[in-house]
Amino acid sequence: MAGRSVRPRSPAGSPTLAGVRYLLSDEGGTSGSRARDVAIKAARLYHRDRWRVSPRRRLRWVDRVPLDRPIFFLGVQGAGETLIGRCLRRNRVVVSMSGNADHWTGIDELGIVRNRMARLPDSLLGCRHRRDLDHPVFGSEHNSAYASDALLPLYRSRPADVDEAAGRRFRRLLREHIAVYAHGPWRARFFDKTHTFTLKLPLLTAYLEGCNPYFVLVGRNPYSWCYRAVRRKPPSYRVVLSSAERLRHAAEHWANSYRIALEDAARLRAPLAVVRLEDFVADAETTVRRLCDALELEFEPGMVPQPGQRLPFATLPGDRKWYPLVEDEWLGRVTDEGAAIVESVCEPLAEQLGYRRGGSTVAPTGSAAGHSPL
């Protein structure tokens, strides 16, 4: 792994000032009422950062809290992890970094929140706020690019990178969140979807040895996803690149992410389920039931998106990641030229995962089929 000498810090060195700026900014959209927007964001900050001020995380018994079968969603940003993950987070035993089933729309990525990043080992940091990895082309925000060929060596972990001191820090951090947020700490299941963990199975399996972690690889059609990524989730490019170059970076990112996750899981014999966003949208209940079976999690009907379910108050205005489920709106915009670029990079892996340019899906084949497709 590349050396990292600069730890991410909050703007101006003050988490409080950063929080105030967030409350007063337009970040997160608007409900049409300034007062309501501030109240929503204040509630989100409270839930997310209650961990920082809670005395429970400092109690002696925290080290005895079981890390029982923690769940990690893997994949690429914008593949549906948030939507499908929320189904699990509505289960009463599931806990994330921002709360439990009472607050299931808060952030759920340890690796991209600055105060959590300060506690994580360097090797498990996410792809945002990376001033320690300020790249001349990609900048310090590496959305949808950290697994591209240029950045992959800075993010991918291998067995030789395992550091037990880092593992102890990681396990303690997870236990603290369970202690603070769980309805019942002794039977809780921790959930996280930090996207860079897709490249870090050797570390996660080593650091959680004996805890029986479960991994879920969430897939999305690369022809659609790559087109969306360059428009919705680009890195902070420092140079002007052509649309073709940006699309190729996104395609490299998709292909490397899924290839490495499948290869690492097979080599490490890690329990990995493969779920495709398209299958979830087509039949959410069946997908959630199968996912619960694969994760040894009790299915609850309320875990399936359906009419009449109220989102928690602290859900950002404009958040559409629940009911109603929507079909892919990007695939029809892909040009022949763009599809050719994606195909040149993502095949044959896309075919193995059951994806074709026209949006049709078939059963996964080859190595992808060997990992419990749902």
Image (cartoon, helix red, strand yellow):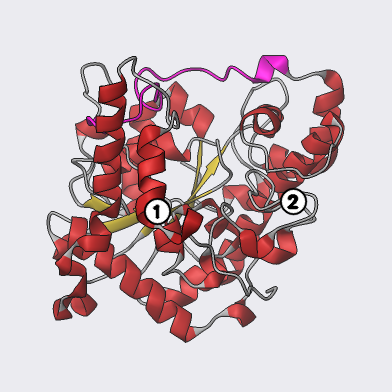
Q: Which mark is residue 148?
A: 2
| Residue 324 highlighted magenta (yes or no) | yes
Q: Which mark is residue 192?
A: 1
Mark with earlier residue (2, 1):
2
Which residue of the protein is positioned furthest toward the left in this rendering?
A: 184
- Residue 319 visible: yes
Residue 13 position in % (x across, y down) = 46, 61
In front here: 256 or 266?
256
Query: Which type of secondary structure does the marked residue at label 1 adopt?
Result: strand
Q: Which residue is depicted at the point 81% across and 39% down?
A: 248
Vertical position of residue 68 compared to residue 163: above or below = above
Q: Which residue is depicted at the point 65% across and 43% down?
A: 144
Query: Which type of secondary structure does the marked residue at label 2 adopt?
Result: loop
Q: Residues within 10 Å of mark 1 (few under 14, many from 20)?
A: many
Q: Contact (CB < 8 A) between labels 2 and 1?
A: no
In front here: 116 or 88?
116
Q: Residues within 10 Å of mark 2 (few under 14, many from 20)?
A: many
Tell me which segment is drawn in magenta. Answer: 312-333
Place residue 41 in its image quadrant: top left
